[in-house]
Amino acid sequence: MTDLETLDSADQGAIEDEDLAAIREGSLGSDAWRELRRRPLFWICITIIAVLLAMAAFPQLFTSLDPEAQDQRNGLMFPSREHWFGTDLFGRDVYANVIYGARVSIVIAFVVTTFCAIIALIFGSLAGYYGGWIDSIISRITDVWFAIPGVLGSIVMLQMFETRNIATLSLALIVFSWTTMLRLTRSAVLAVKHADYIDSARALGATDFRIIWRHILPNALTPLLVYMAIFFGVVIAAEATLTFIGVGLQKPSISWGLIISDSRARIQTHPYLLLFPGAILSMAVFAFILLGDLLRDAFDPRQR
Amino acid sequence: MDPLLVVDDLHVEFRTDDGVVRAVNGLSYMVDRRETVAILGESGSGKSVSAQAIMGLIASPPGFITKGSVRFEGRELLTMAEDERRKVRGADIAMVFQDALSALNPVFSVGWQISEMFRKHRGASKKEAKKSAVELMELVEIPDATNRYRSFPHEFSGGMRQRVMIAMALALDPDVLIADEPTTALDVTVQAQVMQLLENVQAEFGMGLVLITHDLGVVAEQADRVVVMYAGRAMEKGTIDEIFDQPHHPYTEGLMNSIPRLDDLNERLNPIRGNPPDLLRIPSGCAFRPRCPYQQPDCAEVEPTLEFVGDSGRSTACHHWRDAFGE
Amino acid sequence: MATYIIRRLLQMIPVFIFATMLIFAMVFSLPGDPIRALAGERAQSESVRQALIEEYNLDDPLPVQYGKYAAGLLRGDFGANFRGRPVSDIIKQRLPITARLAAVAFVFEVFLGVLAGILAGVRQRGFFDSLVLVSTLTVISIPIFVLGFLAQVTFGLKLGWFPVAGIKQGWISYLLPGMVLGSVSLAYVARLTRSSLIDNLGADYVRTATAKGLTRGRVVGVHAMRNSLIPVVTYLGIDLGALLGGAIVTETVFNIPGLGGAVFDGVVRQEGTTVVGITTFIILVYMFTTLLVDILYAVLDPRIRYD
């Protein structure tokens, strides 16, 4: 090969660099998509999640009743045509409460998942890409947090707030659950850091930021994406649990955890008070965890 | 007397989501005691799959042996009851794998893994089994065998690990030893030592050796006969001298030409042009046709079968070997 | 091996210091009045304020406060509740109850979880495999307080198979809550065993074991399982630590006066000191079991020891 040819092909490499990355990513993505598309479970998941999101955004679409309207004379009514899920002690419609309760769950899960992912992406890729003392510091801090069980840490932290609302609850969940995502991102970045195409991008003079952003993260993102779906479901469950324990949301918020907590005294005589909200809550968690499972299967060629 | 091991018209395919991968398509060869047969081929030529089929190691599904026969001392292995087949494995036909680090169990000591052969096949006591295992480790020239008995695979060097694999395969004094790329994962100097060891143990135990490799150098030193495989078929068979001195198949010739020659430094390397075939879509007729410099129109239509060249027993699967290589 | 243990122990020290510092920081340096946070409504009483300032050295500078707090932890001093009862006393009384519950849960998850995982893993994509995958996913998705209530209503009230709540009836009282508590871990254990076994069944050394002429039972049961169980045992160890830390939700649902129940009571009664004290203890137990699990891991996997 003459020198001219070498130059020429290097130049081409620079131009095609991005296209290649896009193609590689695209083919992986489209493979996974083809795999997902033909699984009925995937469409069930997507439907449940779409309905949940619609409930959170436009609860009025699902019920014309006011979840807070009390009607003492019609308290503790079993499910009927007017009240699909029955009414609670104060005559409030349980169905309307369940519909309106979706919003806080979704909002908290979204906020917590997003923030944890941002923390993980920034510090996980810094630790994985630069290694050395940056990695040591970030990893040791992660170790400390990892030593504290998440729910307990959140309880202690929430215990210290005078008022507890969506913001404090989200904060407590973020503070004690970012570690797994960070470790995931760090090891994913470490795994692709030494791939040949990264080395060639570096040789062609790409900046660190560009290498991380264009070349490493797209390839490291898959495990994070899978975990985010599962995590979304886990946060919904954690929010309900903390609220149930009494360190989460407080009345007059409408939340699945509160509805279920209220049902406690009467589950023997009026089990529907628990059953319907419990079923919806579980279904929401189920949909996100299953979505994560399906994504992992689709992205992992070994499973096919 | 029946030959030791006869592989006859073996067909293996893998049924995957993307289609049927035809890994082995009518392979035949035989091995006798004290004889070394080399199966030579590129990766994807079906040489390892055929070995696993002989050992009964093909996971089914997705793998299926669709046709053919494998006879050991006249007994058909492919239709044998699993329990009987199991007793053949390890005891009569043993196998050495390519990458000893992954082929040895990481959580058991090497001594334990060798002595397991005596305990499970022969019902030996722990003490007897250990004694025999240490003797074997000494036989394959692992220094300080008594102490190394307790070591784990990751604590050995690559060459020593491969010696452990060989010791394990030799444990029950098998009649056939199949070595699947035994030296590929090793450094060049260590390769020679391990090959020498295989030669020594063959001389001592007198077993038939099936040597699966892509390395012509390994073949040249060790093999009595060679089976050249391509796309799951035998392209040419013959003695080592016949194959090396005067190939009678375009593929074999291509392989020989691609060896760098130390005596002629100015000569350019002549790799075979093109790529090995996609086993999902093997070309019609002769599988080597798209890469063959001698191809004729009829090569696409009729698949060549092995035909004898002369009367020495060598054979080639090429329609036009007479035109290309002469009588 | 000894150096490995010593190294892990040494690594534990900074984790201990920083983790306790973290709890301390949350309690005492978050914006707001720590006394109010610790005492809730009682903070209005001057005597309570004085007692708390005394107890937690609130007049000292923060580093000194932390030093005294950490020294207390090392002596086993986890503070006291508002009737002056040391939290360590509460722990001593309640830990055995939690331990009994944990034992039931642990036995349940180990046996059924590993068994289900093996049966699913050896026949991947078979009927039982699908059944295990779907049922474990369902169990994981149902928040434990919902599961607890359901079990209570169904098996306690309707069918009457188990006591509904409390621990008055001895061992049998622990069965239902134990199974509820263990169910989520059971699901994880089953899934982990399954995927780990499937991974290992595809490994080269399993092929070697088959080539050695060993029976299928021995290939799977000894060669593949010994490797597959490494992550499972690790998970079980960490889970045991979590179980011993008490199950706040399960103990609350079933009215079991263990450590978790004490944390819940503390939250309800706004006894911040009890909550913080017990939680700190639980975190220490958790850290300690994590350390033991690391050592166990090195025992199980010879490749780790010489890193």
Image: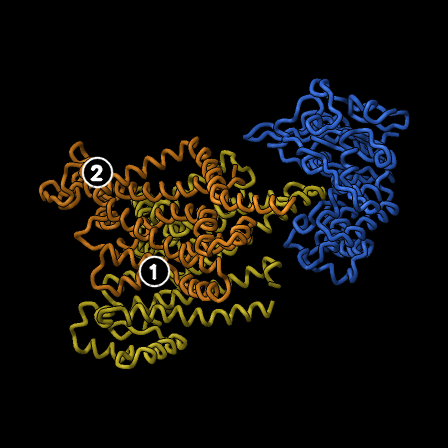
Q: Marks 1 and 2: which is nearer the front?
A: 1
Classify mark 2: helix, strand or loop: loop
Give the x, y percent position of residue C253: 30, 53
Residue A286, quarter of the rendered image? top left
- In the image, taking residue A178 as reference, residue C119 lies left or right, namely right
- Tags 1 and 2 touching, CB below 8 Å: no
Q: Read off the chain for label 1.
A: A
Give residue A175's mark.
1
Q: Residue at x 67, y 29 (%)?
A: B12
What count of labels does the image hold? 2
Residue A109: image location, x then y, percent: 31, 49
Tell me which amino acid carries mark 2.
Answer: Phe
Packing grade of label 1 (10 A; few <14, some 14-19, many >=20) is some
In the image, which lettered chain appears orange? A
Q: Chain of mark 2?
A: A
| Amino acid type of the residue tagged 1 in the rendering | Val
Q: Looking at this view, is B101 or A256 the one in front?
A: B101
What residue is at 18 percent from the left and 36 percent from the top? A63
The picture's colour for chain C is yellow
Any part of residue B228 in sight: yes
Judge left or right: residue C126 versus residue B129.
left
Which quarter of the picture shows residue C103? bottom left
Residue located farthest toward the front when viewing the structure as drawn: A4
Is residue C86 positioned above or below A128 on the image? Answer: below
**Chain B pictured colour:** blue
Real-space CA distance between mark 1 and mark 2, rounded to the nearest whole angstrom: 36 Å
Q: Which residue is mark 2?
A: A85
Quarter of the image with the N terminus of chain C is: bottom right
Q: Quadrant of the C terminus of chain C?
A: bottom right
Residue B115 in sight in this render:
no
